[in-house]
Amino acid sequence: MYLTLLEGWNGWDVDNPKPDILDSTHRPDWVSHWIRCGRKAVPHRQLKDLTTMSEEWWGFWKSLQPEWRGIDTVKGPLSASHRGGAVKGEWGELSKRGVNGMITVVAGLAFWGLVASGGTRRQKDIWENAVEETKWVLQCMALD
């Protein structure tokens, strides 16, 4: 599942000459810790329970979404129904690349996935949905 996300990433990040920094306002502290430590290792001590990780990652992800997606009032995780339609505008914050761009989202998913692998089927499904959501966005941005 995660490897298909990386395939979506592959055609997108390499073509942009201008790296940028994602808004960190809602970034989970376990992702921030990884960045502060030079992106060298999994922030094991900072990782939280699956419910908290899910809520924090989805809060971060939704805060980065462009207004045209119309998800500002969505409670909890986004679902497959929130993706798939026509792209109606620019990707804004999400189109930031480089070591301080979308890689922070992808790394956050990886850390959450490590913890989710030992969780319930429902917890794994929520993580897999986040992977699919991120992959869809990356693929859409690669087409722009």
Image (spheres, rainbow, N blue to C red):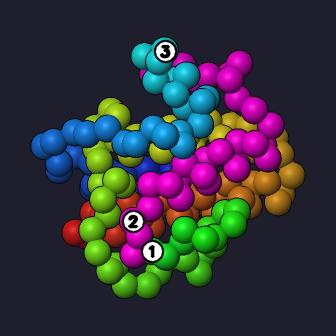
Name the residue located 48 percent from the left edge and 44 percent from the top edge: 105
Whole-number angstrom distance, CA of label 3 to CA of label 1: 33 Å
Amino acid found under the numbered disc labelled 3: Cys
- In the rendered image, residue 115 lying in the magenta stretch gets the answer no
Q: Which label was assigned to residue 66?
A: 2
Location of mark 1 (residue): 69
Residue where numbered disc 3 is placed: 37
Q: Secondary structure at mark 3?
A: loop
Q: Residue 54: within the magenta?
A: yes
Instruction: Report helix, strand or loop for mark 2.
Output: loop
Mark 1: which secondary structure?
A: helix
Q: Amino acid at mark 1?
A: Arg
**Residue 106 makes an appearance in the image:** no
List x then y, in percent, for residue 121: 83, 57
Looking at the image, residue 59 lies above or below residue 118 = below
Q: Are marks 2 and 1 in contact (CB under 8 Å)?
A: yes
Magenta region, residue range = 39-68
Q: Is residue 75 above or below residue 130?
A: below
4 or 82, which is in the foreground? Answer: 82
